[in-house]
Structure formats: C-alpha cells, structure tokens
Image (tube, helix red, strand yellow):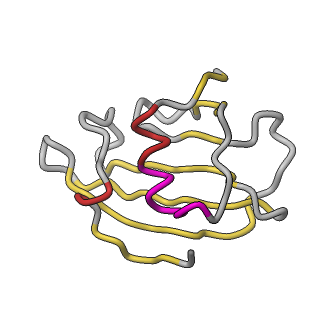
Amino acid sequence: MIREIREEEKKLIAHIVKDEIEIPKFIRELKDGGMGSISFDLNKKSIRYESLFNAEFIDSDGLLVDIELTIDEQGNLFEFDFFKVDFNKLINYPKYENLTITKCNI
C-alpha cells in the first residue's frame, strides 16, 4: 500500500540522515506483519545497494527490534526495515534517542 510518510517516520529518518539525503513524501508499506518496515521505491524498480544505518531498541513489550536504513544504487533512500525478534507487530515507534546505534555510514 502506498501512503504518505508519517510524521514519526519522517522525524526519525531525518534525524538519521541529517539533511544528507532527501526524504520522499510517499512510501510503500512492506508486508512484514506490522513491524513497521517501509520502502521508498514505489515502483519496485530499484535495487538495494548499501546499508547506511543499523540500530536496535527495545519495544515496550521488552523485545528487541533491529532496524536498518538502506539506499539504492542511485544513492536514494531504499528501505527502512524493522525486524522484531518474535515477528510480531511493533507496539511503539522508536525515537532516535532510544536507539542503540550499531552502524552509521552517514
């Protein structure tokens, strides 16, 4: 489903990319069981090129969530992936200050 990017998503991504990469207005929700993953590749024509940012946080149910922000071969945002260890729905969307950063190439 294509929709407008939510303010909480935009705010978190903006904090990560620090005006280095344009954040698109529209995204495509990925079928991940409600974990929160989104794609910026609306036409499904790009290819994942590189991971820019990896972090983790603890959701309000105490479970670990890994996140990864990737770019395509043109340097545009590609996907913002969330992976909750039990594959269940994300309860609380993270804030930047709650992340433990494990990789940052921005």
Q: Which residues are magenta?
A: 12-19
Q: Give 51 or 25, whichever is nearer the viewer.
A: 25
Q: Residue at image x 56%, y 78%?
A: 105
Q: Is residue 64 left or right of residue 11?
A: left
Q: Is residue 82 left or right of residue 20?
A: left
Looking at the rendered image, the quarter that the C terminus falls into is bottom right
Q: Residue at image x 41%, y 30%?
A: 34
Q: In the figure, residue 17 lies in which quadrant?
A: bottom right
User: 106 above or below 85?
Assistant: below
Asked if the stretch drawn in magenta spans residue 18, the answer is yes
User: 69 above or below 53?
Assistant: above
Q: Residue at image x 84%, y 62%?
A: 74
Number of numbered callouts drawn: 0
Looking at the rendered image, the quarter that the N terminus falls into is top right
Q: Is residue 41 left or right of residue 29?
A: right
Q: Give 58 or 93, whichever is nearer the viewer.
A: 93
- Give the image location of residue 9, x and y in percent: 45, 40
- Give the image location of residue 27, x and y in percent: 64, 33
- Give the image location of residue 97, x and y in percent: 25, 60
Q: In the figure, residue 52 lies in which quadrant?
A: bottom right
User: 74 above or below 37?
Assistant: below
- Give the image location of residue 70, x and y in percent: 62, 61
- Farthest residue, direction front: 19
Q: Main secondary structure of the magenta part?
A: helix
Q: Give 56 or 22, whichever is nearer the viewer.
A: 22
Asked if the stretch drawn in magenta spans residue 93, the answer is no
Q: Residue at image x 31%, y 36%?
A: 90
